[in-house]
Image (tube, rainbow, N blue to C red):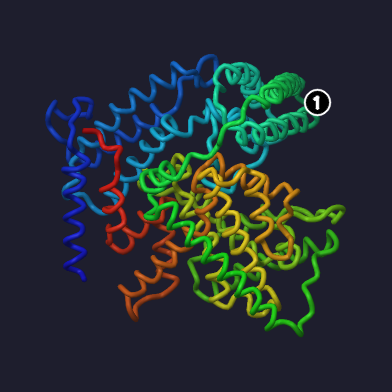
Amino acid sequence: MERARATARLLFAGLIAIGLGCSTSSDSRNVAPGARSGRYADLVSLFNDWRLFEQPRMVDGVPDYSVAAMAMQHARLADYRNRLTALDTTGWTTPQQVDYNIVRAEMNGLDFNHRVLKPWARNPAFYVSFYPSRSDQPAREGTVPAGAIELWEWSFPLTPDRANELAARLRTIPGFLTQARRNLTGNAGDLWNYGIGSVADQSAALAALSARVAATNPNVDSAAQQARIATDQFRQWLEQQAPSRTGPSGIGVENYNWYLRNVQLVPYTWANEEVLMRRELDRSRAALKLEEDRNRNLPQQVPIADANDYTKRFNNAVTEYMAFLRDHKVLTVRDYMDPALRARMGSFSPPTKPREFFDEVSYRDPIIMLTHDYHWFDLARMDAEPHPDPIRTHALLYNTFVTRTEGFATAMEEMMMHEGFIDSHPRSRELIFILIAERAARALGDLHLQSNDFTMQQAKQFASDWTPRGWLRVDGGTVSGEQHLYLQQPAYGTSYIIGKIQFDELLNERARQLGDSYSTLAFMDHFNSVGLIPMSLIRWEMTGNPDQIIAMTRTDSSRVH
C-alpha cells in the first residue's frame, strides 16, 4: 500500500511538472524567459498577483462588469495560467502541492464565470451589493460583486469617520445599478424572476438602515435613501423586462461536470451525485420511520413556547454541547468557541405563522443545530488562529470551500449522534434524519435545476414534497432562498451531502492508516489545522493519498498549451 502511494505521488508530480507545466511564460517572477521556477515562494507571489487581478477595475468606486472589461479580463487570464503552469512542483511538500491546486481551482473558477455562468450578464441578483448580516461561510455564498457592503462590519453607533465611509460606499449603489441595465443581456428566465425578489430584499434592508440612522447620521440616512430609490427603480426595470426573459437558467450536465472536477475539486459527476443524493434520501427517510417506530410510546417533542424558555434552553444547549466536546475528547475546545455560539443564539419568534424549516427543528431541540453551527467555530478560528499558510489565510474564491464548511457541518450532526451526544434527548435522533432528508431533497433540486429538467417552482415543490412532516413549506422563504442560491451557484446544494460523504471516506481512510493509535481528538485537531479548503485536498494532505486529484487533473481541459 505504501509503495503504491509513493508511486501515485511520483505520478502526480509528473502530471504537474509535465501535463500542467507544458507552457512557460516570461511573466513568472524572478524566472528567466524559457526557464521554469521550482520555488514555492513564486507560487505565493503569483497568488498575491492573481488575487489583485481577479477583482474587476473600479471606476469611481463602482466595479466595472461591462462587456469590454470582462472580455479584457478573460483574455488576460491566460497570462496567469501560464505563470502557474510554468512552476515546477517537483520536490514540493504535500501542503505546497495542495496550495498549487487551490490556485489552479480559483483560476478555473474565474474562467468558468466568463465562459458559462456570466453572472454580470445573466443574473440580476448579482447586482445586490448590500448585506446587513454576516454569512456563516468564510465568504458570502454565491456570486457576489466586488465592493459589496457587509453592514455587520460597521459598529453602531457610527463614528464620524466610519459614517462618512459608509455613506460614500452607499452612494456607489445607484451607479452600479445603472451599469446593471447595460450589462444584463441574458435570457435566463428563473434567474431573472427570482432575482427580482433579491433586489426587493435589498430595498427593505436599506430602508431598515435608513430608519436606524435617521436621528444620528443624516449623511448615511440620505445615502441609504438614495440607494433605496435606485434599487426600487432597478426592480421596476427588471419587472418590465421579465416577460422577455424566457430561456433556461441551468448550465447543463456537461458544464456541471467540468465545474465539479475543475473548480470544486469534487471527484464525482452529475450522474454520480444524483445516485448518491437519492440513496441518502432513501436512507434518511427509512431511518426516520424506524426511529419513529422505536419512539412510538414516547411523547412528541413540544416546540419552545415563549421567550424565557427560548433563552434558557438555547443557553443550556450551548453549555451541554461544549461540555460534551471537552469531556468526550471529540476535539480540542478553544476559548473562542463558546462565545461564538452564544453570539448567534438569536431571539424567540412567536408562532404567528408556520415556522420555517430550521426553526421547526431548533424549537424542538436547540441542541441539534448547534452541531451544524460548526461554521461559527470555523470563522472564530480564522480570526483567532489564522492559518500560517499565506494561500489559506483568507477565504478561498468561488465557494470552493463548501465541501469542507457545509459538508463537514452536515457530517458533524450525525457524527455527534454516533458519539452519543443526544442519547439523553428523547426523539432527537429523528431530527437528525429529517435534516439529512431535507439536504438530499433540495440537492436533487440543485442537480435538476442545473440540468434544466426542473424549473425553480418544480425544484421547490420536489424539495418540499420529499422533506418529512411538511416542515419545508413550498410557500416558505427557506425553500425559495435555497433553490435560488443553488441555481446561481452550481454544486452548492449538493455540497452538504457530498462533503459529508467525503468526510466519512476521509475518517475511514485515516483510521485504517492509524490503526489502534486512532483517536477522534487527534483526528479532528489535524482536520481543523488543514484549513477551509476542498475536502479532496484535505484528504490528500491528511492521508498522503493524491489519487482523486490525479484523476481530476487528467481531465482538466483548462491546461494552457
Using the image, determine if residue 245 lies above or below residue 41. Answer: above
Percent position (x, y) of residue 452?
Answer: 54, 43
Give the left or right position of residue 49, taking residue 381 as reference. Answer: left
Q: Position of residue 462 (x, y in %)?
A: 64, 54
Left or right: 547, with 51 as reference point? left
The image quarter containing residue 433 is bottom right
Foreground residue among 469 and 325: 469
Q: Is residue 36 visible?
A: yes
| Residue at which label 1 appears | 214
> Is 409 placed above or below 162 here?
below
Q: Residue at x 31, y 64 (%)?
A: 543
The quadrant in which the N terminus is found is: bottom left
Q: Where is the C terminus found, in terms of image quarters?
A: top left
Residue 487, by quadrant, is top right
Q: Position of residue 466 (x, y in %)?
A: 65, 61
The amino acid on which the numbered mark 1 sits, given as a three-letter code, is: Ala
Question: Which sits in the foreground, 435 or 380?
Answer: 435
Instruction: Please give the count of numbered marks on the rendered protein.
Output: 1
Q: Tell me, yes or no, if residue 220 can be seen here.
A: no
Q: Position of residue 534 (x, y in %)?
A: 41, 52
Q: Which of the two residues, 294 or 343, is positioned nearer the viewer here?
A: 294
Question: Residue shown at 24%/31% (left/top)?
Answer: 82
